[in-house]
Amino acid sequence: MMAEGSLIVVGTGIRLAQQCTPEARDAIESADVVFAVVPDAVAEHWLGTLNSNLVSLQSLYGGERTRAETYEEMTEAILSGVRDAKRVCAVFYGHPGVFVTPSHEAVRRARTEGFDAHLLPGISAEDCLYADLGVDPGRLGCQSYEATDFIVNERKIDTTATLIIWQIAVAGDLTFRVLEPDARRLGVLAEVLLEDYPPDHNVIVYEAATLPVTAAKMQTLPLRDLYDAEVSQVSTLYVPPLTRPKPSQARLALLKERLG
Ligand SMILES: C[S@@+](CC[C@H](N)C(=O)[O-])C[C@H]1O[C@@H](n2cnc3c(N)ncnc32)[C@H](O)[C@@H]1O
């Protein structure tokens, strides 16, 4: 038998109110308690109009904590409500399962402890990027990486596909405490990209609009100038493909051989 208490994890989308799905909204409205990790007071206020029993976890960022410590505290705060036999809704901005650690971890722990727990899809920054920049990931393929992961690990980049790099404000921060951008760390990200792309390859620093009254920001600049870009905590880097993919004659022959 399922333990009493449950968890549903939802996203608000990026453009407040407008991109929150009906099922996410229902979950927020019908919860006993809502834990929220949303970026600003406007978003918190809006959530408060849907459910007055709102607990903001945003203040757990910063101070002396590493991001891992913050995520652990968020996860345990959410779980505490579930263990108290409440119907808990945890709300993150964007898609709650895209580049978000405590959402997946809270669902995993809740299930391990015998609670009903699931995560609903939402509209992510990448979804907005596809719409605003007119990119279809199915046309030439698409790779998505977190910026520090991209710098530190020896990735094999496919320059014939789109490349999207998340969290460029904290690119290369190995303390996992910093929240602000730094031109030197951005410069290192550019140097890593220059291993595969030429200096004059144009990239876009992208910020989706977060309110109905604001517009998306798109800064186009050559890779060599990336260190100089205006970057915020919600900037994502779009690197377009450099060349077209080359068809593999061997695989075409294989298909022909197998299928006639
Ligand atoms: C912790 S992740 C959260 C992503 C979020 N869950 C989503 O579904 O988009 C934060 C990163 O998402 C990207 N991001 C968040 N808001 C954005 C926006 N308004 N425009 C572009 N990218 C954004 C940035 O790369 C940022 O550093």
Image: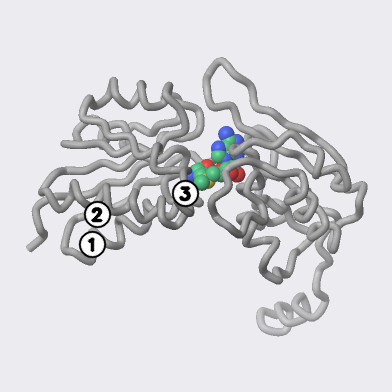
> Left or right: where does residue 53 sit relative to residue 208?
left
Q: Amino acid at mark 1?
A: Arg
Q: Amino acid at mark 3?
A: Glu
Residue topped by disc 3: 64
Is disc 2 in contact with disc 1, using a CB cutoff of under 8 Å?
A: yes
Question: Is residue 225 visible to the viewer in this orientation of the structure?
Answer: yes
Q: Amino acid at mark 2?
A: Ala
Looking at the rendered image, the disc whose residue lies closer to the viewer, 2 or 3, is 3
Real-space Cα distance between discs 2 and 3?
31 Å
Image quarter (top left, top right, bottom left or bottom right) of the C terminus: bottom right
Q: Residue at x 64, y 39 (%)?
A: 235
Residue topped by disc 1: 111
Q: Residue at x 59, y 37 (%)?
A: 234
**Dot 1 beta carbon under 8 Å from ligand 1:** no
Asked whether 170 or 127 is in front, the reply is 170
Q: What number is the disc on residue 41? A: none
Measuring from the top left, give residue 9's x and y in whole percent: 32, 46
> Left or right: where does residue 91 sit relative to residue 137?
left
Q: Quadrant of ligand 1?
A: top right
Asked whether 91 or 186 is in front, the reply is 186
Q: Quadrant of residue 242?
A: bottom right
Real-space Cα distance between discs 1 and 3?
31 Å
First in sequence, mark 1 or 3: give its number.
3
Residue topped by disc 2: 117
Real-space Cα distance between discs 2 and 1?
6 Å
Kind of element beneath mark 1: helix
In this rendering, is residue 24 above or below 144? above
In this rendering, is residue 236 above or below 230? below
Measuring from the top left, give residue 159's x and y in whole percent: 80, 60
Kind of element beneath mark 2: strand
Asked whether 159 or 227 is in front, the reply is 227
The outermost residue toward the top is: 213
